[in-house]
Image (tube, rainbow, N blue to C red):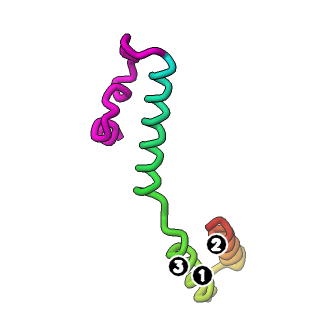
Amino acid sequence: MMTILVQIGLKKVVTGRKPEILNQIEWEKLDEKALSALWKRLETLYAAKPLANRLMLKKRLFTFRMNECELLRNHISQFISLLNDLKNV
């Protein structure tokens, strides 16, 4: 993440020490900008595509079957987990 901050020109924030030439308000604005940039980068890296996720979960739900040797309790638990995942997308 530090390299991302350096790449977008926020090298001052990487060190974590406020330079004397910046007042507190400027430092806070710089810090907010860094946090915003990091959050956007994390979203692009790790946020899954909602439509693709929903379709994949629906496919798993429609093809969800119980195995012969599987316990009913485990099957119901997996089913509820799948429904919760689908609800949260």
Report the span colored magenta. 1-23
Q: Quadrant of residue 1?
A: top left
Nearest the eye: 44 or 10: 10
> Alpha-carbon distance for marks 2 and 1?
7 Å
Could you tell whether 57 is left or right of 33 in the image?
right
**In the structure shown, which secondary structural element does the residue marked by tag 1 occupy?**
helix
Q: Amino acid at mark 1?
A: Lys
* Position of residue 63 measured from the top left corner of the image (x, y, whole percent): 58, 88
* Position of residue 77 measured from the top left corner of the image (x, y, whole percent): 68, 71
Q: Amino acid at mark 3?
A: Met
Q: Amino acid at mark 2?
A: Leu
Nearest the eye: 72 or 35: 35
* Label 1 sits on residue: 58
Nearest the eye: 25 or 80: 25
> Which residue occupies 41% across, 50% down?
41
> Which residue occupies 36% across, 15% down?
19
* Label 2 sits on residue: 86
Q: Residues within 10 Å of mark 3 (few under 14, many from 20)?
A: few
**In the structure shown, which secondary structural element does the residue marked by tag 3 occupy?**
helix
